[in-house]
Image (cartoon, rainbow, N blue to C red):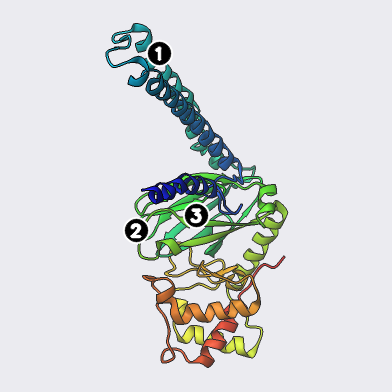
């Protein structure tokens, strides 16, 4: 019995540790470290609601503590009945008015923020030449990858979203197959991507917070969509306004060229393998192609990506990128079950052709700072 009690003493310690650790997180992934105007406002609302709930819990706990100490039988005696307050108008008014006040304190800013974040009036603004002034990104969710199209700039990217800091970025989100949910935890709440209708919202990426996060945020699918739901990630690269303009110019120049020339004989052989294996049927290799139609992600900037397939980290070295690409091509079914590409064994793709294809993919680069 004593040993059992000793074990139970550890429960409050583990509970406290779990509570503390639940608030830990990297700045690029934590909702508790807001990195933009939208995230900050949502965070403030969450803090307000938490304060209200804690106050209610404290009041209830105090009343409960008073009741079990002041009126315990050993203190007042066996035959004593405390004064009954049934039908007290004062108490009835208090426990009716106070909850209404608390609900209003929470409801008014919640409704106000809902309408504020739902305001899309800026999307309709144009300059003297009739061009839209707001930056708009069309997001298309697929099993299990993301497409980002910049309709006003004529640019398409896959898996990695590039945005400027300190300005509103508007997103039109839709799904190709099943319901998904677009979510960048550190920058704002999630929004569903439906098959039959398009949802629109905006986010704002704070430059200082972005710098603290290394100018890289993580995005995720927040709606259970299949066996690789947990692996349906994307990355967000933030740039200053000037750098973003440079990125757009580089992408548009590459889009006009339509095809990137291999920079070595091995890469040239890889380009041939790319066509022989019919990869071009699913993947565009120009940042101006494939919006809303590609079966697989646009590969125009594949060599610049920080991750392969959103899950294999390239940032250690060029060797790690090469190994990740080969691993993905050979074992895509195992790495992301349910993906549409499948894996290529030695009978489908020889080691020599895999080396050439990898070299070609690593050379697909448009913008380098």
User: Which one is earlier in the sequence, the residue at label 3 or at label 2?
Assistant: 3
The spot of residue 141 in percent (x, y) is 43, 59
User: Which one is earlier in the sequence, the residue at label 2 or at label 1?
Assistant: 1
The spot of residue 178 in percent (x, y) is 34, 58
User: Which one is earlier in the sequence, the residue at label 3 or at label 1?
Assistant: 1
Q: Which residue is mark 1?
A: 94
Nearer to us: label 3 or label 1: 1
The kind of secondary structure element at disc 1 is: helix
Specify whether 38 is left or right of 343: right
Q: CA distance from mark 3 to mark 1?
A: 51 Å
Closest to the observer, 315 or 163 = 315
Q: Which residue is mark 2?
A: 178
Q: Which residue is mark 3?
A: 138
The spot of residue 208 in percent (x, y) is 70, 48
Residue at the image position 39 percent from the left and 24 percent from the top = 64
Residue at the image position 46 percent from the left and 53 percent from the top = 182
Specify whether 108 is left or right of 239: left
Q: Is residue 72 visible?
A: no
Residue farthest toward the top in the current orientation of the protein: 89
């Amino acid at each position: 019995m004593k040993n059992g009690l000793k074990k139970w003493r550890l429960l409050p310690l583990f509970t406290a540790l779990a509570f503390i650790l639940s608030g830990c997180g990297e700045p690029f992934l934590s909702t508790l470290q807001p990195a933009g105007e939208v995230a900050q406002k949502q965070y403030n609302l969450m803090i307000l609601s938490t304060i209200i709930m804690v106050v209610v819990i404290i009041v209830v706990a105090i009343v409960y503590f008073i009741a079990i100490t002041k009126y315990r039988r050993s203190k007042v005696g066996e035959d004593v009945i405390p004064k009954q307050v049934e039908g007290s108008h004062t108490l009835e008014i208090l426990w009716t008015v106070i909850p209404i006040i608390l609900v209003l304190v929470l409801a008014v800013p919640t409704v106000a923020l809902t309408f504020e974040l739902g305001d899309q009036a800026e999307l309709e603004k144009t300059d003297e030449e009739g061009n839209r002034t707001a930056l708009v990104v069309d997001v298309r969710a697929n099993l299990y990858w993301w497409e980002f199209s910049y309709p006003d700039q004529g640019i398409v990217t896959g898996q990695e979203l590039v945005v400027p800091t300190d300005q509103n970025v508007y997103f039109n989100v839709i799904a190709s197959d099943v319901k998904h949910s677009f979510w960048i935890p550190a920058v704002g709440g999630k929004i569903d991507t439906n098959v039959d209708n398009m949802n629109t919202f905006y986010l704002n990426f704070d430059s200082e917070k972005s710098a603290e996060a290394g100018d890289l945020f993580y995005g995720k699918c927040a709606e259970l969509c299949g066996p690789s739901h947990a692996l349906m990630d994307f990355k967000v690269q933030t740039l200053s306004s000037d750098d973003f303009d440079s990125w757009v110019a580089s992408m548009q120049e590459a889009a006009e060229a339509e095809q990137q020339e291999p920079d070595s004989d091995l890469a040239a052989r890889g380009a041939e393998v790319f066509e022989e294996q019919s990869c071009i049927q699913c993947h565009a290799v120009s940042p101006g192609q494939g919006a809303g139609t590609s079966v697989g992600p646009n590969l125009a900037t594949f060599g610049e990506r920080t991750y392969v397939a959103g899950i294999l980290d390239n940032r250690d070295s060029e060797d790690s990128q090469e190994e990740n690409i080969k691993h993905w091509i050979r074992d895509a079914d195992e790495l992301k079950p349910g993906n549409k590409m499948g894996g290529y064994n030695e009978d489908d793709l020889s080691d020599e052709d895999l080396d050439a294809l990898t070299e070609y993919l690593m050379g697909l680069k448009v913008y380098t700072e």
